[in-house]
Amino acid sequence: MHWLFSPHTIGVISATLAHAGPASGGSDAPQLDPVVLVLQASIPVKIVLVLLVAFSVACWLVIGVKALHLSRARGESTKFLEVFDKGMRFDEIAQGLTAFRGSPFARIFAVGYDEMLRMTGGTLAKLDDAQGLHVESATRRAAAKEVSHLESWMALLGTIGSTAPFIGLFGTVYGIMDAFLSIGNQQNANLPVVAPKIAEALIATAIGLVAAIPSVMAYNYFARRVQLLSDLMEGFAADVAARARMGGV
């Protein structure tokens, strides 16, 4: 077939094929890998990503611990309230408190029972008005303390939920700014120059949302559960004080 073309024509065709052949199919085009983008990201963006990953890990640890904590508190409190509502004497209830160590209601009762014994010299006896007010004040303080204990670490969830999106946004802004600086320095606005910088910026936003969304949802859920227990404990503190006035019967 070579005799059909002049040497000059053959040289032009060969050069054209050599230049366009591998790129025409797109099989050798560089692929953007998120892991590689993160590893090659700028130092500020890496700091943002590490901070957001740490926030996400801390968020899930708190969610797991608080879920177990509230589940145990609710389960053992239900059993303890059944015992308390049976009308047993305070000394009989106190003997079985070791079975309800995870119940905030049991601890409120223990405070009221101890204060009643201290007022009466260690015996079950009716209290006067001043003694009854003192026991009621003690049980209310114990209820407030238990609510604070149930709310422990929830502030961390609220902090993560409110700050993680803004930290991710900072990483995004810095990544986009870095992309524009690359365009200005290289005098080239081609997609291969801009795409990696913008992609790593958007990864920061995504990880910020991954950390923030579960935190906000968990905080709202736990806050609602704690509020329900708080309302019950306030009424229970008054019940313990009322029965203490009658001698714990």
Image (cartoon, rainbow, N blue to C red):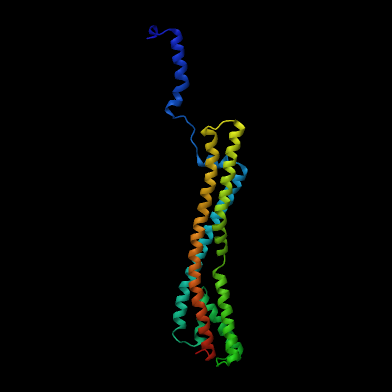
From where the camera sits, is residue 99 visible? no
Q: Which is more toward the observer, 121 or 37?
A: 37
Q: Could you say which quadrant of the image residue 17 lies in?
A: top left
Q: Could you say which quadrant of the image residue 161 lies in?
A: bottom right
Residue 236 vs 58, above or below: the answer is below
The residue drawn where x is 46% and y is 19% is 18
Q: Which is more toward the observer, 2 or 80?
A: 2
| The N terminus sits in image quarter | top left
Tally of numbered discs = 0
The answer to whether residue 116 is left or right of residue 10 is: right
The answer to whether residue 4 is left or right of residue 131 is: left
Residue 18 vs 86, above or below: the answer is above
The residue drawn where x is 46% and y is 13% is 12
The residue drawn where x is 59% and y is 78% is 141
Residue 146 vs 182, above or below: the answer is below
From where the camera sits, is residue 80 visible? yes
Residue 29 placement (x, y as % from top left)? 47, 31
Q: Which is more toward the observer, 180 or 90?
A: 180
Residue 91 placement (x, y as % from top left)? 52, 87
Residue 157 vs 76, above or below: the answer is above
Residue 51 placement (x, y as % from top left)? 59, 51
